[in-house]
Image: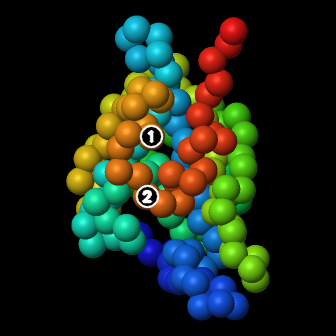
Amino acid sequence: MRGDGDGWAVGPDGEKRWGRHGAAGLLLRAPLADGRPAVLLQHRAAWSHQGGTWALPGGARDSHESTVDAAVREAQEEAGIDVAAVTVRAERVTSGLAGGWTYTTVVADATETLVTSLNQESTELRWVPEPEVEAMPLHSGFAEAWPSLRTSPVR
C-alpha cells in the first residue's frame, strides 16, 4: 500500500533519503530461550535502497502519522508483526538532513520472539542476539545508530 510519504526527500546538498515526510523503523527486542536479548532484523531485498544489507523493519512516514504509528505499521507490513504483542518504550531521532527530514528509531519490546512473515521488501527476517548484530552487513544508517541503541549490560 502506497501512502503520501513514499518518495525521496532531498537535502540542500542533494543528498536523498527515503520518505517525503521522514521515516521510522521499529527496533523490536525480545528474549531468546536462554534469556539473551535479541532484535528483529530485516535482510533488505536487492532492489531496495542499500539492498542486501540488514536493518530494522521501517520506511516512509505518511503526513498524518506519528513516528510511532509509522514504525509499527511498517513492521506489520514488512514483517507481519502482531502489533498487539508490541509495547513501545521510546523513540529517538537517529538520522537527519538539513531541511527537516528525520529517521526515528522506535524502541519496543515483545515478551517473546514473535512469528514473522516476509513481504517483497525482505529476503529474510531474523531474531539476532544483540552481540551478533554488529558483525552483520548492516545498512549504513543502522550501523551508525546501532552503538547508541543496543542495550548495556547490567553490572
At 60% across and 41% down in the image, what residue appears? Answer: 147
**Which residue is identified by label 1?**
134
Residue 115 is drawn in which quadrant? top left
Q: Residue 105 in the image: x percent, y percent?
A: 63, 51
In-front residue for pair 95/59: 95
Judging from the image, what secondary structure is the residue with disc 1 in? loop
Residue 94 is drawn in which quadrant? bottom right
Using residue 56 as the reference point, say whether residue 9 is left or right of it: right
13, above or below 113, in the image: below
Using residue 118 as the reference point, say whether residue 154 is left or right of it: right
Q: Which quadrant of the rendered structure holds the N terminus?
A: bottom left
Residue 119 can be seen in this image: no
Q: Which quadrant of the rendered structure holds the C terminus?
A: top right
**Which residue is identified by label 2?**
139
Query: Nearer the viewer's eye, disc 1 or disc 2?
Result: 1
At 28% across and 60% down in the image, what residue appears? Answer: 52
Q: What coloring was used for the rendering?
A: rainbow
70, above or below 125, in the image: below
In-front residue for pair 82/108: 108
Q: Residue 130 in the image: x percent, y percent?
A: 47, 29
Q: Residue 36 in the image: x percent, y percent?
A: 47, 16
Judging from the image, what secondary structure is the residue with disc 2 in? loop
Residue 83's label in the rendered image is none
141, above or below 128, in the image: below
Q: Residue 68 in the image: x percent, y percent?
A: 66, 51
Residue 90 can be seen in this image: yes
- Disc 2 marks which amino acid? His
Name which of mark 1 and mark 2 comes first in the sequence.
1
- Disc 1 marks which amino acid? Glu
How packed mark 2 is, by other alpha carbons closer than 10 Å (few <14, some 14-19, many 20 or more), is some
At 66% across and 62% down in the image, what residue appears? Answer: 95
